[in-house]
């Protein structure tokens, strides 16, 4: 008889703790909004400043705000030198784990400082100075982290381009960022084999109107690239003879990096991140959200080409003096679905962060968790998930197998760090599957209707954040302040438009359900359907095309193209499919995972010519929908349904 009583008591205790923590979370959140200056000034004590700020929050140019104006610092100093000076030189800073090359080694803070300061010395001697842009097109190897930190050391602005993008995507970024220098490696390594990067780099430089004069190329053992005389220098040789250079102080408001992300058009948006606010926000998040401090081991299994990699593989763990795991591999197939768990055990990872897709892949290949049986995960406190919506099944599967808290949290390239999360370091609250929990201090999140009115609890709407955004969020878009204002700040004056739709429950838990624009999320990778359409339209047989994201059990979403052909096209279906798929691979890259395409006679449109992508998506995913009153030809929806049914998506009408 005593069991149930004990159970109830424990439940009561947990509920009370969660309630107390919810109250604590709310107090912190309210304080951060009521007194942002004192809140962030307090947080800024975690950072070393060369010169203190004049103003914590500078509102002079609202709606463009800046944090810590007048202050000076160096991000690399805070992430590397400072820890060596404070006696952490012998601690491993980066634990490189590469199942695809069968290599594992640790790099101490002492070694990291030596590598970064010499690479920066070489770059400086090559003419790179503060404010110059440097593109980094590299795989998941320690040199990529050295490259980012070397830029930060000089005050140069890095722009890392994900390796899974094609030459044209790289060319678009080169043209926009106009780099003085590009750092690259001969190849990346995927489970399918060696992926040469150098030919893609050469093609991108040729395609770009901005002429790149210097490249530093790391030749990896798996593939040796030929260097272009007069332009390319060999990384190993260059750095070996370089002289170390000290950190260059920069303004807190100077850009640290530009990271391109998909917008609704084919042209990517260059998100600009500053130095000061970024260091403060990331340091705060490590303690309060991830519960990680000096000496702890943190692992974000993402790629440095994405924002998760920037914030949580590179900067945040190093800023707080932790050890970061740099993983070159996949959750499955390199060699098996146990690689994550064995790595956590071996390197005593305290806090682990990955995308729901990765867990779905493991769940598919190891449904009963057999690979978990012989590992000791006592070191692991929490699994964090983000990058895409986390379906409750995936969350519960991970909870049941790991017997650890599994924490969904929501953010974007633009915000740079979590907007909604469970503060695991300070005030862990109840986990509600499907929700990334509560708005994080600094972010005043609201759900509004088309007119900007707050919607009632539980009702869906556009998710917005009241300005100013906290430190660490984007400050503008590179080369395009107008686009920044138009895309994010103009729809609801005084608010930042996240582009996500969702709702809030009575306790303030947020539920992020979908995008309101044409962005899709494929395996946690953000892609623009507009870009797919631009590329597919280049095919000579294509008159018109609509690309939508359809639900996928593994990758969350997959792009699916419906094409209308020009009159008189004689190409066979098979050839057309092959050519369209190859075109997307050539122009966007393998990361697009584009394999679903079908020919249709006519696209559904409104009378004013707007393609009804939202309705098509609902048909594909078997969701209910209303036939828009403004539809030009309702019969086109039947054409869509038939095409999708043939591809195994929409159920056929009976
Ligand atoms: N360089 C070159 N090519 C790359 C690449 C890189 N850095 N990253 C991916 N690719 C290629 C892959 O080789 C694959 O090419 P293929 O079509 O020739 O096989 C393609 O891009 C798609 O890759 P990916 O999205 O990794 O899919 P996959 O089918 O190979 O693997 C998963 C499926 C689930 C294992 C994988 O998507 C995964 O690990 N997802 C987790 C994603 C993640 O961590 N996201 C972080 C965002 S926070
Ligand atoms: P990115 O800028 O690539 O990080 O992608 C950001 C987008 O991914 C967000 O705007 C959301 O649409 C989606 N996203 C990220 N994390 C989550 C999450 N935890 N829940 C739901 N959607 C998410």
Image (spheres, grey):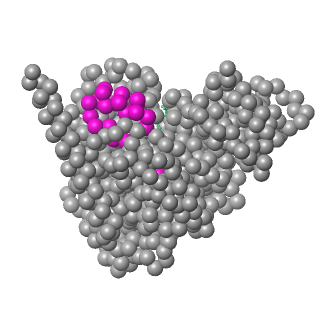
Q: Quadrant of the N terminus?
A: top left
Residue 251 vs residue 27: left or right?
right
Q: Which residues are magenta?
A: 390-415
Residue 540: tell me if it is visible.
yes
Q: Quadrant of the C terminus?
A: top right
| Residue at point 31%, 26% (across, down) | 401
Q: Is residue 241 magenta?
A: no
* Furthest residue in direction right, as rendered: 568
| Residue at point 39%, 64% (across, down) | 470
Residue 106 vs residue 226: left or right?
left
Residue 400 vs residue 630: left or right?
left
Q: Is residue 393 magenta?
A: yes
Taking depth in this image into account, of 261 and 72 the one nearest to the observer is 261
**Compared to 209, does 339 lie above or below?**
above
Percent coordinates x, y for residue 538 in the rendering: 77, 44
Percent coordinates x, y for residue 643 in the rendering: 72, 28
Taking depth in this image into account, of 366 and 174 the one nearest to the observer is 366
Taking depth in this image into account, of 131 and 541 the one nearest to the observer is 541
| Residue at point 34%, 55% (across, down) | 440
Percent coordinates x, y for residue 586 in the rendering: 68, 40
* Furthest residue in direction left, as rendered: 2
How many tags in the picture? Answer: 0
Percent coordinates x, y for residue 406 in the rendering: 32, 37
Residue 146: tell me if it is visible.
no
Taking depth in this image into account, of 650 and 573 the one nearest to the observer is 650
**Compared to 553, does 240 lie above or below?**
below
For residue 488, which quarter of the picture? bottom right
Residue 469 vs residue 34: left or right?
right
| Residue at point 43%, 76% (across, down) | 59
């Amino acid at each position: 008889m005593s069991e149930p009583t004990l159970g109830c008591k424990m439940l009561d205790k947990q509920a009370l703790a969660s309630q107390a923590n919810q109250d604590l979370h709310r107090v912190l959140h309210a304080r951060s909004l009521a007194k942002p200056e004192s809140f962030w000034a307090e947080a800024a004590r975690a950072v070393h400043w060369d010169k203190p700020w004049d103003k914590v929050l500078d509102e002079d140019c609202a709606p463009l705000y800046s944090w810590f104006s007048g202050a000076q610092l160096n991000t690399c100093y805070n992430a590397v030198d400072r820890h060596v000076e404070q006696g952490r030189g012998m601690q491993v800073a980066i634990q490189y784990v590469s199942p695809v090359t069968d290599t594992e080694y640790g790099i101490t803070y002492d070694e990291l400082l030596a590598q970064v300061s010499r690479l920066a010395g070489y770059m400086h001697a090559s003419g790179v100075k503060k404010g110059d842009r440097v593109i980094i097109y590299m795989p998941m190897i320690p040199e990529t982290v050295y490259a980012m930190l070397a830029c930060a050391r000089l005050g140069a602005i890095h722009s890392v381009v994900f390796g899974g993008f094609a030459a044209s995507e790289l060319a678009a970024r080169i043209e926009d960022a106009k780099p003085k220098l590009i750092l690259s490696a001969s190849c990346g390594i995927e489970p399918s084999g060696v992926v040469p990067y150098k030919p893609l780099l050469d093609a991108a430089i040729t395609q770009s109107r901005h002429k790149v004069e210097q490249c530093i190329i790391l030749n990896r053992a798996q593939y040796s690239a030929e260097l272009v005389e007069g332009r390319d220098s060999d990384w190993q040789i260059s750095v070996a003879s370089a002289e170390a250079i000290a950190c260059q102080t920069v303004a807190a408001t100077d850009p640290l990096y530009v990271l391109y992300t998909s917008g609704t058009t084919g042209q990517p948006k260059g998100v600009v991140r500053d130095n000061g606010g970024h260091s403060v926000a990331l340091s705060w998040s490590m303690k309060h959200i991830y519960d990680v401090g000096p000496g702890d081991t943190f692992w974000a299994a993402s790629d440095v080409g994405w924002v998760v990699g920037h914030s949580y593989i590179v900067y945040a763990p190093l800023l707080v003096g932790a050890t970061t795991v740099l993983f070159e591999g996949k959750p499955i197939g390199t060699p098996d679905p146990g690689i994550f768990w064995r790595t956590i055990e071996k390197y005593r990872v305290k806090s682990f962060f990955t995308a729901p897709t990765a867990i779905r892949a493991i769940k598919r290949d190891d449904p009963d968790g057999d690979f978990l049986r012989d590992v000791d995960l006592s070191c692991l406190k929490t699994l964090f998930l983000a990058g895409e919506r986390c379906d409750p099944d995936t969350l519960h599967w991970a909870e049941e197998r790991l017997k650890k808290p599994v924490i969904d949290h929501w953010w974007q390239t633009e915000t740079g760090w979590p907007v909604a999360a469970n503060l695991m370091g300070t005030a862990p609250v109840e986990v509600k599957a499907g929700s990334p929990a509560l708005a994080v201090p600094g972010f005043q999140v609201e759900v509004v209707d088309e007119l900007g009115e707050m919607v009632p609890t539980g009702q869906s709407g556009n998710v917005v954040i009241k300005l100013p955004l906290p430190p660490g969020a984007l400050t503008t878009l590179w080369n395009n302040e107008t686009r920044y204002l138009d895309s994010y700040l103009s729809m609801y004056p005084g608010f930042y438009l996240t582009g996500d739709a969702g709702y809030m429950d009575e306790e303030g838990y947020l539920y992020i359900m979908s995008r309101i624009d044409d962005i899709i999320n494929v395996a946690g990778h953000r892609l623009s359907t507009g870009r797919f359409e631009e590329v597919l339209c280049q095919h000579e047989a294509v008159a018109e095309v609509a690309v939508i994201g359809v639900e996928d059990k593994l990758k969350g979403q997959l792009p699916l193209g419906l094409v209308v052909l020009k009159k008189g096209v004689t190409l066979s279906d098979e050839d057309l499919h092959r050519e369209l798929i190859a075109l997307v691979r050539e122009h966007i890259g393998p990361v697009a995972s584009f394999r679903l395409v079908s020919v249709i006679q006519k696209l559904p449109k409104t009378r004013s010519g707007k393609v009804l992508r939202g309705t098509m998506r609902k048909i594909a995913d078997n969701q209910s929908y209303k036939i828009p009153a403004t539809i030009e030809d309702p019969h086109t929806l039947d054409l869509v349904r038939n095409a999708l049914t043939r591809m195994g998506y929409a159920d056929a009408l009976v």
